[in-house]
Amino acid sequence: MTVRPVERPRRTFGTQIYLLEVWRGLAITFRHLFVNLGRHALRALGVKTAAPGAVTIQYPEDPAVLGRRARTRHRLLKRGDGAPRCTACLLCETICPAKCIRITAEDAPDPRIEKRAKTFDIDLGLCVFCGYCVEACPVDAIRMDAQDVELSAYTRRDMIWNMPELLGDVPKLPRV
Amino acid sequence: MATPRHVTFQLNGRTVEAEEGRLVIDAAKDAGVEIPHYCYHPALGNPGNCRMCVVEVAGAPKPQVSCRLAVREGLDVRSDSPAAKRAQASALELHLVNHPLDCPVCDQSGECGLQDYYMTVGRYQSQAREDKEHKSKRVEAGPHVMLDQERCILCTRCTRFVDDVTKTHELGIFGRGHEERLDLAPDKVLDNAYSGNVVDLCPVGALTDRDFRYKVRVWYLDKTDSICPGCARGCSISVHTSTKRPWHNGGRRVARLKPRYNAAVNGHWICDEGRYSYKSLDENRLGKVLRLRPSREELSWEVLAAELAGRLRGGLAAGGPEGLAVAASGALSNEDWAAFKALFVDALKLPRLYFAADPDQVGEQDELLRRREKVPNLKAAEALGLRGGSFDALAADLAAGKIWGLWVIERDLDRVWGRRAAELLAKPELTVYQSPFKGALGDAYAYRLPATAYVEEEGHFTNFEGRVQAYRRALDPIGAARPDAAIFGLVAAALEGIRSREGAAA
């Protein structure tokens, strides 16, 4: 890694009286205002501009738009026959730097599957959303693409998602 | 017998000295060079069928298997030359042709010979294009062992174990070619007293432990050297504990016991009785110092020691040392026995000590490892000159009302006397129970003191041959539990304190 020294902006008379800088900032704001106003106006008249006019999203009234590859809440995937894909190999639990995954294993009734998860809990209050669990999984059983970023709860216990919740079999509801 | 001649030979360009006729694979191991191998096992011979230990020998047209090659003067062996490495990688590739890619669900992964050697000598691109041969994946070979035929590489270590060591012949190799498989002999079940050892000696995940199955991945285990307390043999074991993630093992801290090689005592093996003795280690444990009679109260060790010393002193003054009986067991360590002697023999001069293995701590004995006495350390009591009476005599004295005080150490009297025990225990006015486990009669005593189990303390056991062996501490004690020696020391100090105060007053 190379270190690039950056010179600190010098204090001059111009910066210290503030007025000049305030005007400069306002100039930028007004430039955006008029540029966007112009773009929206041209588009309303049917003229296509190179870039669309900026729009403010009214979050949380309007939903946030996420990229399809955004790393969001985990979900567990199923096989074709509806059984969870997870074989309880514990690689995700092993690699997890936040130690937020807890798995216990059991014998699967199908001898070709052999081992499956009995319980699979993720404590989203501890999760750092690094995505290592997805990388580690050898059977594509866990993905972080639930497109859910609004993760909050009134208790720490409610931040823990269990296997049916992660599979999407039951909705995540506060425990009473 | 003629003394073996020492010769020098070349190993990877290094001059190494070894006994003439010693196997090259052993001589290399002595010199710090590990040659990969599956079928060869120091205790089970060298059939030479796995071909993993191939080395290049100067003058030989083809690579040779080092487990069947004797050291002779001037031999020039290379285990790390490109030709030797290529031969080893090819042998591994053939082993893996039909080996399933089960590593994520396989209990062996993390301690698997195939994984280890793939990383050290393998790292090839698989050329196999055919589908893998499928065989039975879940054969219950016996009460402790699960067999996965697909994972087996047919090294025959396990069949040689049941043929040569236990001589019970439960396992065999059946079929030819790609149909060849390890299976149970007709009408047999792998249920001999040493069946768990096949799990340890299996270099792959074909034979796995049913008790350990899917509990803890091996990389979560901590390993501590210890001595098996299951019988007077005192086999060297390794205690594998899982404490950082308690949910894996259902809260049990000890995940498994494995034999530790000790040529003088147990070789490579341990018996199943000892191997599965860990299960009771976290059940029915004591962690509080309690007075149960006349009123139930939790005490600190200091208060307990003062109170108990006072009552012992009073009882001795009134009833004499003949009326105080101490029942112990051979589960005590050398250190515990020394403190036991200092307190009960040297300080209190008690004539009534009971620690015989009979009738409840005896079991089967055999030629291989198991001893009749199912406690590890009666020899130390003998070495200290302690002499104990029989439990029948103690029962008679209790029934006759000759005993005013009874101190029981790591012994469940319910197992000694059966149904009579509770009745006999109600006779003395002072009863003390000191043990890691509650036992069947844990509530029947006046005082109940928690002691540490062998995995929570360190000390020494003296086995039946008089060999003193150390065991290390693998876990933290439960609650207030202390080693037996420390408890004896506390009470002895409290007694000494009373005596010196009385001396000063007089």
Image: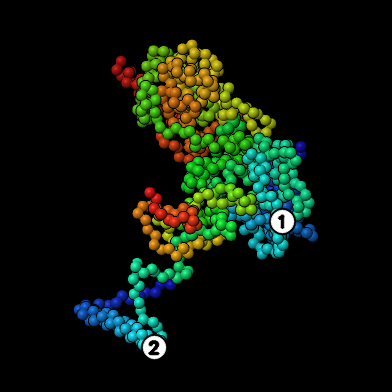
What is the distance, in whole Å, between disc 1 and disc 2 at their CAs?
A: 67 Å
Which residue is drawn at the image coordinates 59% and 50% (left, top)? A108
Which chain does the numbered disc 2 sit on?
Answer: A
Residue A31 numbered mark, or none: none
User: Quick check: B13 above or below A45?
Assistant: above
Q: Could you say whether the residue bearing mark 2 is in a helix, strand or loop?
A: loop
Residue tagged 1: B133
Q: In the image shown, does A128 or A36 lie closer to the viewer?
A: A36
Q: Position of residue B261 (x, y in %)?
A: 62, 41
Which residue is drawn at the image coordinates 35% and 77% (left, top)? A55
Q: Which quarter of the picture shows residue B142? A: top right
**Residue A90 shown left or right of residue B445 in the figure:** right
Residue A47 numbered mark, or none: 2
Q: Is residue B165 visible?
A: no
Q: Is residue B360 visible?
A: yes
Q: Position of residue B456 (x, y in %)?
A: 48, 37
Which residue is drawn at the image coordinates 51% and 29% (left, top)? B332
Check the picture and name the quadrant holding the N terminus of chain A.
bottom left
**Residue B367 shown left or right of residue A94 in the figure:** right
Q: Are marks 1 and 2 on the same chain?
A: no
Q: Position of residue B46 (x, y in %)?
A: 74, 47
Amino acid type, residue under disc 1 in the picture: Glu
